[in-house]
Amino acid sequence: ADSTDAAKSMDAAIAPAITMNLRWAAVLGNHDQEGTLSREGVMRHLVGMKNTLSRFNPEGVEIDGFGNYNLEVGGVEGTLLANKSVLNLYFLDSGDRSTVWWIPGYGWIKASQQAWFKQTSLSLQKNYRNEEPRQKEPAPALAYFHIPLPEFSSFTASDFTGVKQESISSPSINSGFFTTMVEAGDVKAAFIGHDHINDFCGKLTGIQLCYAGGLGYHAYGKAGWSRRARVVSVQLEKTVSGEWQGVKSIKTWKRLDDQHLTTIDSEVLWNRGSNGAGRIMTEAEFRLGDSE
């Protein structure tokens, strides 16, 4: 709310990625409309910036919010999967506050967004399985949005990796998006923000629900608790003959903004053929994965 020029603030925030010539994508949080631009204005600015992969909304679709889109990660050039998406990324606008006057609290992922997600997931899975070269299983997918689903409250300290240091600030109603993801079958992990001093991952019904961890210094944090960012690493399978194939595993860890840029809580979120079971990585495994 104290930003006097929302566009200039976004330019400064994204500048390091642009300077490093990195491709990047963004979704809206719940405070983005409190500066000098509306939520629509913020998203329109983001999609016009250099090196962005962000999209405003799917064309020809009537949908709630701004910044609902998907990205397809193609297979390695020169391989049989070069023209297929071996990893799908879904981005959704989880809103800010409830838009229904008699329902208090935060916003939620609406029916129109879920309908778009279901149709997109179904189409991607159909193409991956039916178009040559045909694949037996759908390509894995990751979902990114800001406000945690009510299902993030399903865990205890014994069944997640990381910490829970504040309450889960979910919408006061459950719009069913978790069930929608479970039924679709391709999403292996969902990543959210919102609660700055929670950073855990927990698995529920085959989907890893993960906090990103608070990164920026302009927003609230906790004294003595380092700001942090979650990293997600995707590994491809390789045949005996050396040809790259589809996704083999999805790993994650957090990088702390401390004196040593410490890495913590390395874990495997998903392995092909493992039914989505997550586990902690040993240091040796992590170092091996980091060098791949």
Image (cartoon, rainbow, N blue to C red):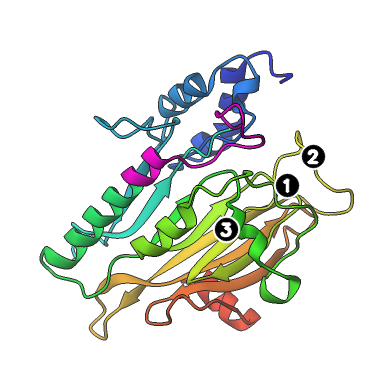
Q: Residue 73's quadrant in the figure?
A: bottom left
Is 142 part of what is drawn in magenta?
A: no
**Farthest residue, direction bottom:** 240
Per the image, label 3 sits on a secondary structure element best described as strand
State which tag comes first along the sequence, 3 or 1: 1
State the CA–CA distance, disc 2 to disc 3.
21 Å
Q: Nearer the viewer, residue 46 or 41?
A: 41
Part of the protein shown in magenta: 97-116
Residue linked to disc 3: 231
Q: How many marks?
A: 3
Q: Are marks 3 and 1 in contact (CB under 8 Å)?
A: no
State the CA–CA distance, disc 3 to disc 1.
16 Å
State the CA–CA distance, disc 2 to disc 1.
7 Å
Mark 2 packing: few (<14 Cα in 10 Å), some, or many (20+)?
Answer: few
Per the image, label 1 sits on a secondary structure element best described as loop
Measured as percent of width and height from the top left, residue 181 is found at: 42, 58
Residue linked to disc 2: 220
Residue 133, above or below 220: below
The answer to whether any part of residue 80 appears in the image is no
Measured as percent of width and height from the top left, residue 96 is found at: 59, 32
Residue 23, above or below 224: above
Q: Closer to the observer: label 3 or label 1?
A: 1
Residue linked to disc 1: 196
Question: Could you tell me which residue is drawn at 52 percent across and 60 percent down?
Answer: 232
Mark 1 packing: few (<14 Cα in 10 Å), some, or many (20+)?
Answer: many
State which tag comes first along the sequence, 2 or 3: 2
Q: Amino acid at mark 3?
A: Val
Measured as percent of width and height from the top left, residue 31 is found at: 64, 29
Measured as percent of width and height from the top left, residue 158 is found at: 73, 76
Q: Are marks 2 and 1 in contact (CB under 8 Å)?
A: yes
Q: Nearer the viewer, residue 240 or 99?
A: 99
State which tag comes first along the sequence, 2 or 1: 1
